[in-house]
Image (cartoon, rainbow, N blue to C red):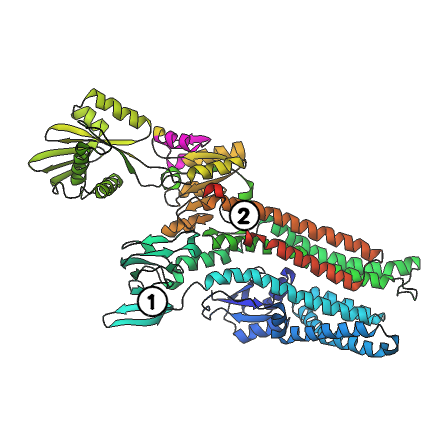
């Protein structure tokens, strides 16, 4: 089904967004209309509607439509001053002039002799700011058959004029229009935070051809093209380095504080910044499917995942406005009719019940209440994206706050997933810091495994390069793999065997002392292999998948904040327990099949409550799906991780995890603060209005002031500091 997307500018209220939705649903051919207040994005599904038709309907309600097809500008999105923002559009410009007229009129009222002149200024201000307000109110009623905020303010202003309170009416509409503009200006700051991420994508790239170089639009770049990336240039698409080495700043994408060295074979990502080296890269994904683009799309899609508290507030607001409107009517007519109370204001200055009802109409506006949650969640999702964390909806942030157990996969999550060589021990070791016999043993092992792609072979090869032993032995002949045991090879006229301890116990006799050393290492969770050459056992090598540098601090941080931790591993029990004990994890379960991990997670949920599972997002998919919150580590390396997990840490590190939980806790706290503040303020002014102590302009200031407070409070996640020092 065709989909059209636009940005609605000047949107300052979630209730206003709903009014626009209702108005557009009246357009023939549209099957679905959704306008997300926090991001300002309008989604239309159904027949393709001309943009002019959509724009005209939106403009009739006082807002502007912007196409999303234009390429984003390069560099950060600039934020104009509030006065420039007001002067940019015709209606806000009229409001600014109206505010000036109101000020002059109030000043002239200090001299009773020119009171008539003061009223002329007030009426001018009322017309300049009030006529557009009344037109928007009428269009809103015509399209949606609902009393939106524009209608409520128009009724209040007309009522004030009817009882002779022209100054009150002018002040009401001018303050309301200014406050609406200020709300729109403020909420735009939140939306620009995400737009600044969008501007990280360059518009052009340098493509290499047989004839030389050419500058082309990024949209024309295809998978397999070769691109030149010059020093200090932004990388336009995801790719793989073919030629050159450089340090690349990936902070906009992954949140890494330090540049990452890139060499031939390494991946690079769109939006990251090249250092001082020149690179040639091969395009691996088109621009529309880059990792950064998927993060942006993920954040925008996440807005549809509304937390339960936000759904409750939205439902409450739908009943609140009509209820208070009916109460305002009853307040205006019941006391005068039933109890003989004054309907109009008394000459002595007492406020009549009509005036009190008009004040209630202003208070009936639900802006602050319905803005309290979406702005906060959108700010939180954007703050996470800026630090390389993709959260697929506010519902998952809400669940993260409730998490009581964090379960971890071992390999590739708590550990680096790359076995490191820990011990090289020749049977005739000479001792000392560097033993020639042990070096010879290592060179022999490398010769046997030279053509192997096994993780242990890579660890051996790395150690050989570090010690400068690459060319000591030639490549072997007749290499044979013995599944589950090891390898056989032949070179220099001798047979060589490299295998595990079980194989040597069965078929290759070796000294008892050597056997005891190996058993001791295996009890510590290390993997060992023995080497025989020329009919003699020459020694052994030991390997271990070492924990990530930040794993211990991350586990400790979670435990200090009352979260239970568990390790779920498919590795051998002794290996998992060694890692778990070293990191201070509360519970260790191993060895586990994927289905057994699901059973353990259900048991943890029953015992503790909400569970989060942290894994690599590929072989841990069942566990990620079983937990209430699935968190994938290293999402830039796995498209599957971005599809299956609820949260994706784009960088291959656990460091963002504490920030993620701090963000969830802060978001939960801010949402509750905003809702409570909005409701209590409404209740207080409702009482003041009924008692006749609240003026119309006071009610406007209270309503719009509270709206601004919840917006600024809801934007606090954008300023949340990065990772705690204890985890760096």
Name the side, left or right, on which 699 lies relative to 140: right
Against 728, is 74 above or below? below
Tell me the residue that label 1 is attached to. 221
703 or 543, which lies in front? 543
Against 411, is 273 above or below? below
Work out which residue is located at the far left of the displayed protein and give it. 493
Query: Where are the magenta residues, as a range?
Result: 575-596
Q: What element carries label 2?
A: helix
Q: How many other residues sit within 10 Å of disc 2, few (<14), some (14-19) or many (≥20)?
A: many
For marks 2 and 1, give the one nearer the viewer.
Answer: 2
Position of residue 55 measured from the top left corner of the image (x, y, whole percent): 57, 73
Q: Specify whether residue 296 is in view.
A: yes
Tell me the residue that label 2 is attached to. 663
Q: Specify whether residue 626 is in view.
A: no
523 or 53, which lies in front? 523
Name the side, left or right, on which 102 lies relative to 644: right
Residue at (36, 56) in percent of width and height: 248
Residue at (80, 59) in percent of width and height: 328
Rendered image quadrant of residue 552: top left
Position of residue 168 measured from the top left corner of the image (x, y, whole percent): 80, 68
14 or 511, which lies in front? 511
Position of residue 97 measured from the top left corner of the image (x, y, whole percent): 70, 75
Q: Is mark 1 on a helix, strand or loop?
A: loop
Q: Which of marks 2 and 1 is nearer the N terminus?
A: 1
Name the side, left or right, on which 14 lies relative to 467: right
């Amino acid at each position: 089904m065709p989909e059209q997307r636009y940005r609605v500018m000047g949107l300052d209220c979630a209730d206003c967004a709903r009014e626009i939705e209702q108005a557009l649903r009246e357009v023939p051919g549209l099957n679905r209309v959704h306008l997300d207040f926090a991001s300002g994005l309008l989604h239309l599904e159904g027949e393709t509607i001309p943009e002019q038709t959509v724009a005209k309907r939106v403009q009739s309600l006082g807002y502007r439509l912007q196409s999303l097809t234009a390429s984003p500008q390069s560099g950060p999105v600039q934020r104009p001053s509030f006065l420039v923002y007001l002067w940019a559009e015709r209606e806000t410009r009229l409001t600014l002039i109206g505010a000036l007229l109101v000020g002059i009129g109030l000043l002239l009222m200090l001299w009773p002799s020119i009171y008539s002149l003061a009223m002329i200024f007030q009426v001018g201000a009322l017309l300049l700011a009030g006529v557009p307000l009344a037109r928007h109110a009428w269009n809103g009623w015509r399209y949606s058959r609902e009393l939106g905020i524009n209608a409520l303010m128009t009724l209040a202003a007309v009522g004030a004029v009817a009882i002779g309170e022209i100054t009150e009416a002018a002040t009401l509409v001018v303050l309301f229009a200014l406050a609406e503009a200020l709300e729109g200006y403020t909420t735009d700051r939140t939306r620009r935070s995400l737009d600044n991420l969008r501007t990280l994508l360059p518009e052009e790239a340098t493509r290499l051809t047989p004839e030389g170089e050419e500058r082309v639009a990024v949209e024309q770049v295809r998978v397999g093209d070769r691109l030149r990336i010059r020093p200090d240039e932004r990388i336009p698409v995801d790719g793989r380095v073919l030629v050159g080495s450089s340090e690349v700043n990936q902070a906009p994408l992954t949140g890494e504080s330090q540049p990452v060295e890139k060499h031939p074979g390494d991946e690079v990502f769109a939006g990251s910044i090249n250092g001082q080296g020149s690179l040639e890269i091969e395009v691996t994904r088109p621009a529309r499917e880059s990792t950064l683009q998927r993060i942006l799309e993920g954040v925008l899609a996440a807005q549809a995942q509304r937390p339960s508290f936000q759904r409750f507030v939205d439902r409450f607001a739908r009943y609140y406005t009509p209820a208070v409107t009916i109460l305002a009517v009853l307040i205006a007519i019941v006391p005068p009719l039933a109890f003989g109370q004054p309907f109009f204001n008394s000459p002595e200055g007492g406020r009549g019940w009509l005036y009190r009802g008009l004040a209630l109409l202003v208070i009936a506006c639900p802006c602050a209440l319905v803005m309290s949650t979406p702005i906060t969640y959108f700010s939180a999702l954007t703050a996470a994206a800026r630090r390389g964390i993709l959260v697929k909806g506010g519902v998952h942030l809400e669940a993260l706050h409730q998490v009581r157990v964090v379960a971890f996969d071992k390999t590739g999550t708590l550990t680096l997933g790359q076995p490191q060589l820990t011990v090289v021990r020749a049977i005739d070791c000479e001792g000392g810091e560097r033993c020639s016999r042990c070096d010879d043993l290592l060179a022999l092992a490398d010769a046997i495994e030279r053509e192997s792609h096994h993780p242990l072979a890579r660890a051996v090869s790395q150690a050989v390069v570090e010690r400068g032993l690459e060319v000591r032995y030639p490549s072997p002949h007749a290499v044979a793999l013995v599944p589950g045991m090891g390898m056989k090879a032949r070179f220099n006229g001798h047979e060589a065997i490299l295998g595990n301890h079980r194989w040597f116990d069965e078929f290759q006799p070796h000294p008892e002392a050597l056997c005891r050393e190996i058993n001791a290492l295996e009890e510590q969770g290390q993997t060992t292999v023995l080497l025989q050459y020329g009919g003699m056992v020459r020694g052994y090598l030991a390997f271990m998948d070492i924990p990530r540098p930040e794993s211990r601090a991350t586990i400790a941080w979670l435990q200090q904040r009352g979260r239970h931790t568990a390790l779920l591993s498919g590795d051998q029990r002794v290996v998992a327990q060694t890692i778990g004990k070293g990191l201070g994890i509360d519970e260790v379960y191993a060895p586990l099949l994927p289905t057994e991990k699901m059973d353990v997670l259900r048991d943890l949920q029953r015992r503790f409550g909400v569970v989060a599972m942290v894994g690599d997002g590929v072989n841990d998919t069942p566990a990620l799906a079983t937990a209430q919150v699935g968190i994938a580590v290293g999402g830039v390396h796995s498209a599957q991780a971005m599809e299956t997990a609820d949260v994706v840490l784009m960088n291959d590190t656990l460091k963002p995890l504490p920030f993620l939980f701090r963000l969830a806790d802060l978001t939960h706290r801010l949402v509750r603060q905003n809702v409570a503040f909005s409701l209590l303020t409404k209740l207080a002014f409702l009482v003041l209005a009924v008692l006749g102590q609240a003026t119309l302009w006071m009610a406007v200031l209270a309503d719009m002031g509270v709206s601004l407070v919840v917006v600024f409070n809801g934007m606090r996640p954008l300023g949340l500091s990065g990772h705690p020092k204890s985890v760096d």
